[in-house]
Structures are given as C-alpha cells and as structure tokens.
Amino acid sequence: MTTPEPRERKLRLLLVEDSTADADLAIRRLQQAGFECSFRRVVDEAAMRAALADELPDIILSDFSLPQFDGVSALAIARQVAPDVPFIFLSGTIGEERAIEALKSGAIDYVLKSNPKRLVPAVKRALEDAVLRRENRLAEQRVTRLSRVLQMLSGINAALVRIHDRDEVMRETCRLAHRVGGYAVVMVGLINPTTRMARPVGWAGYDFLADPGREFAVADNEAGDTSLMGRVIRTGEATLCEDIANPAYVIHGRKELLEAGVRSLACLPLRVDNTPVGSFLCGTGADAVIDYDEMKLLEEVAANLSFALQYLDKHEAVEFLSYFEPLTGLPKRALFCERLSRLLVRGVASLPRLAVTVFDIDHLAVINDKFGRHTGDRLLQCVADRLKRDFPDSEQLAHLGGGTFVSMTALPAGAADNPHSHEQLNRIFDLPFSVDGKEIVARIKSGVACYPEDGGEPNQLVQNAEAALKEAKTSGERYLHHRIEMNSELARRVAMEHRLREAFDANQFLLHYQPKIELRTGRIVGAEALIRWQDPEGGLTSPAVFLPLLESAGLMPAADAWVLKQAVADCLGWRGSGLAPVRVAVNISPEALRRRNIAREILQTLGELVDEEHWGIDIEITEGALAEDSAACIHALRLLRAAGVRIAIDDFGTGYSSLGRLSQLPIDTLKIDRAFIQGLPADRKSCTLVATIIDLAHAFELTTVAEGVEERPQLEFLARQGCDESQGYLHSRPVPRAELEKWLAPAADATTSEFQQGNRH
C-alpha cells in the first residue's frame, strides 16, 4: 500500500485538549512535517459529540485528563460515534498500565507530551492503519454480500428440485432472494405472447410491488420501451443500473423505488429455447451497489430459472438437478458410477484397461480466502468448461464436490502403469485460468485406480482412487497409483482424526518446552512451546504424526488456541512461584491467523501478560504465512504488535518473502531455519547466507534466533557473527514443564552456563 507524501495531505483534526498551548504545539509539529491541518478543539463531552456530528475528522488526539472530561470517556464516545477514526492519546499523565488498557479499548497509540518526536510517526502510522482497516472492511462487506448471494443460489437450486409448480417456484425464488440474498426488491415477470405484456408471477420486498394486476409492456423497438423489465425481455440482454437516480434506461415506478430507498437494479432475461420469455429483477438498498461479480451470480440464477421454465413439468428436470452439480453442470458421483457400471457389465474381455482418476485442486481454500468464495466457485466453473473441452465425452467426467473431480480414461494397450491419465489432466491445467479478470494458476494432485486390478465395481474403483489421492496429498506427491494397503492406511488415518477430535475434550494434550539461550550470557531467556499428544492407545505421539492430521481435519486453529491458553497459564504459574523470567514463544498457524478477530482473541487470552518486558508470550508465524502477502494476516500482526506482543518469523529463509521486506513487516525476531545451520561452519555458502541474515536483521533492529543448533562449532560460529539466541539439541531437547521449572528456579542460576556448553541433553 502506498500513501501520499505528507505535503500533499490535508488533515482534519479533533483535539480533546484543555491547554491551548499544547494544542498549538501539536498542530505546529504536524505542520512542520508537511500536513495542512484544519482542527477543532473541544474540552467536554457535549462539545465532542457536537464536533463529531458536524464532521468526522481524519484523526482524534486526546489528552488523558481534563478538568471537565477524561480521555477514557472520549475514547468510548469515539468508538461509539466514529469507530473508523483513529484515536491517539497525547498526554503527559498517562501511565504505562493505563496506556495498555487504552490500547485494548481501541486506541491506536499513545504519545507522551514529554516525547513529542513520536507524534508525527504515530499519526502517519494511524492514518495508514485507518486506510487498511477501511479497505479490509469494504472487502469483507463485499465477500459477505457475495456469500449471501451464493447461499441464495443454493437455496433456489434446492427449491427447483423440491417444488413442481412453476409460479410457486418463482415466488420462492423471490422470497429467498429477499430474505437470504438481502435484496431490497425482487420480482419475476413472465410475458403473455398474445398481449406482449409481462405480468409479475413472484415478488418480494417493498409493498408497492404487491399488485398482481401490475403489467409491463414489451415494445417492438427501443423507442417504445416503458419499463426496464420490458426492455430486457425485448432485447434478451441483461441490464445493470448502478444508480437509478441517473438511469440510462426508462424504469417503471422509479419514483416509488427511490422513495423506498432502492439504489441499484439488475434485470436479467429468462429464456426458453434461447427465446426471452420473462425477466428476473433484483434491487439493492442505498448501502450497496451490485457489481460485476454479483451480476455473474445473478446470471447463474436466471439461467437456472430458465431451465426450470423449460423443463419444470418434465421428469428430465428432476433428473438433471438430482444427478448433476448445478455449479459446474457435471454429473455427480451416482450418475458417474452408473455410467461406469454400464461399461463394466460388458465383461473384462471386451474392455480395455480403464483408469479412474480422482483429482483435487490444490489450495482451493487459500483461493477462497484471498479472492472470495464466489471467485473460487467461478474457478470451478472454468475448470469444468476446460475439462468438457478436452474430454471427448462428458460422460467420462464428474464433480464430486468442492474442488474434487473424477474422470475415466482408456489406457493404451500394454501399458504397465498409468501416468497417462495424470499427464493428460496436467496438460489441461498448464495454462492459468482467467476468472473475472484475474489470472489464477491451478495445480492438481491425483490418485488413480485401474480396472480390473484395483477393483471390479464402480464405487470400489472411485473409493480406491480417492484413497490414492488422500495418500498423495499427505505425502506431497503429485500423483499416486492405488495400492491395497492404502485402504487400511486411510481407515487408520480417519480413526486417528476421530481420536484427535476427542483428545481436546479428554485433556490428552500437553506442552513441552525447548529453551532458547542468549549467546552473550548463556542464560535461558525464552522457550518455545511445543504441543504433544498423550494418545491412550499409542502413548506419547510424535508431532510429525499428528500435526498433519490436525491440519487435514481442520483442527489447527483449535490446537493453536489450546497451546496459547496453556502457555499463558504456565507463564502465570511460574511468575507466581518466583521463578526466573522467561518469554514463551507460541506458534500460530496461517489458518488461524486468517480468521476474523484473531488479534482480539489472542489479546484476550494473553490478558495481563500483554506488553510484559521479561515475562510474556511471543507469537511465531511461519514465513509461508506471508507468501500471499495476506492483508488480513499482516493487519492482525500489526494490531498485536501495537498492543505490545512480540512477533517472530519462524523458519526464515525457506519461504517466499524477500529480505528487503523486513522493514515493512510488523516483526521483532527472525528465527534462522535449521536447514542453514546444519552446514555451519564447513559449508561456505551456508556461512555467507547466515551471516547476511544476521547482519540485515540487526540493521532493522531485529533479534536473531538460530534453530536446530546441535554441534559446538555451529554455536561458536553463530556467536562470532553476533547471533543473539540459540535453540537446539546442543542445549536441550523439548522437555516437560516440570523439568523446565527446575532450570528456572533461583538455585539453578549457577548452572545456566551449562546450556552454553551444550551439557543439557
């Protein structure tokens, strides 16, 4: 994100300040920094409310204590009346404890009047954060709206299967569009070919539509148009009026619509045999405008309604909606297996070898998170279109749900193995997909089962191919052929995922801690909290076994929350017992970091440990979490760091972020990945890379921690290069809480140097 230079920026200020001199000093310092300031100074609640009612400022600067008012009350009013306006305390009386409480309550920052140099940077940072928050809010609102439309689309598709009366289907469509989709006004009109008049058969929203006798003329030419619905039926073209106050076309009842608060209208044709026979009208209130992506979803609704009009009284309609995925138009599992069964009944002798390939789009959830669910659905439609183009017979394909598809192909005669089907599919995904103006690269993983050696029944072949896909996703392979042991492995994995879900309620998880050693003094200054599972069936289970299962089962956010809560409880217990101060690092997964309000949840869990100097919790994230430059992740990290939480990048050097981005990221610590430490000091390239990372990190005033230190020469090299901290088996393996407590006890102070010597194994 780029921001204008200060000299080009006008700044509207609201000063909650009783001292004219202090207000003038603040204004003068901002003007010297290049801001063109206009301001209003208030000293009590009534004046503040009046100022906010007149005009919202760009930023609020407030003293903490005033004769007739106080900063806490001012902050509460600002959060209530102007929640998007940044609020900064500018005070000479605020203490550190009160400042932390203020940040938790919604203040962006605090500046002491005794340190006025911080004012300009604090204001700039607050303005940048305000822009980011506004952008995020607008993006969230847009995604929420499109998600409601998708939910509406799903409900309408279900109604098409459930309801067999045409007019009732149209009424239910309007009801769902209004109640679920959130449209202020909805109408479906169908034409009478004899009279050339369109009559509403369903409507919802404002009362003025509740007139079954209302009709709309369908003209023979543009000059005769008297309504938007009539024009759309005449031309067969979908029309979007973003602002009906300034329409490009005539809109029947525009005055009533404006008075009812309608802002934009979308009208789409309904067709039978490619002939327009009606139209579908949706309107939004003054707080929303229908955009391009939403229009695409409405076109899908209109297409499904058109299909219903043509086939509603025929059994083919019910068959289509029962056996085909409405999103992609591809068969579902049942129809695919039925078609495969018709091939198999011919007998083995008359059939070539068949490959059933189940393939899945990689990281579809990331695409949904980054661009919105609607874009993910449009990608699936583009994938389906390309599959239909490249497969000669669409009966060879099916959509199993989500990002998972299945195909059947005949293998070349005499082929010993079957990479052919995977290579054919990969060629389909070679080129990126153009989705609503975005170029999206999609990759797949696949599992294959062959007839007759991997199964003689359609469902068995599909299930075995799914087992191979599951194994490919777990192992990281792009393609795997089914093996008989995969079925038992899949069953074992499913059973273990079930036990992991129960483990949270049964309190079977525990924390081990691996110390972090300050190289300059040899003291324990921190420890990384690492989750362990005490499996009743298998005993203490390696994280390498259960962490991938937590991730595949969608349990990582729950595991992160448990680790954080337990680490906080342990820290508070150690502090209460008088042990030596230690900072505990807790890993937060990218899935958890992308959740809404994750920063608030973390701060609530940390409680009094927020912004502690020696005791406290540090947050570690993998470098890969920033690979997509996720605005939501970075925003959450900025909020945490502003509240005093320290942030570390784990496994640095293995991801995609460049060293040049370090100055832009809200981080305090770099943890150098163990892959670079292993080659020290013999490997010259490793030495150069590690030394460069340490120097650059120190240039940005970041702490460096070396991971995976196992040998004394590695430690000596790191010490010579100025690395701050070390972590690894040379010092200690991860140990239970009770053992770490022994090392933190006052009596252990004389032995802390043993860690530096590498004697704690």
Image (cartoon, rainbow, N blue to C red):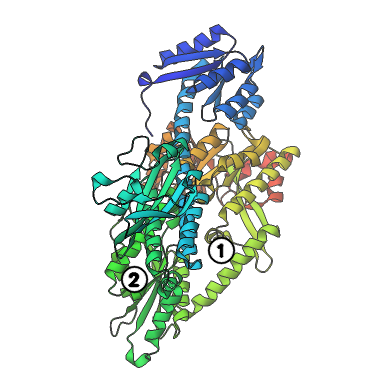
The nearer-to-camera label among 2 and 1 is 2
Residue appearing at x 48%, y 80% in the figure: 484
Residue type (three-letter) at the residue carrying disc 1: Val
Q: Which of the 4 image quadrants contains residue 444? A: bottom left
Give residue 651's position: percent from left, percent from top.
47, 48
Residue farthest toward the right in the current orientation of the protein? 577
Is there any visible trace of residue 298 in the rendered image?
Answer: yes
Residue 672 or 655: which is nearer the viewer?
A: 655
Residue type (three-letter) at the residue carrying disc 2: His
Mark 2, residues whose alpha carbon is within 10 Å: few (<14), some, or many (≥20)?
A: many
SS at mark 1?
A: helix
Residue 165 or 375: which is nearer the viewer?
A: 165
Give residue 151's position: percent from left, percent from top.
49, 55
Residue behind mark 2 = 422
63 relative position to 153: left or right: right
Residue behind mark 1 = 545
Residue appearing at x 57%, y 62% in the figure: 546
Mark 1, residues whose alpha carbon is within 10 Å: few (<14), some, or many (≥20)?
A: few
> Quick one: label 2 or label 1, which is nearer the N terminus?
2
Residue 460 or 305: which is nearer the viewer?
A: 305
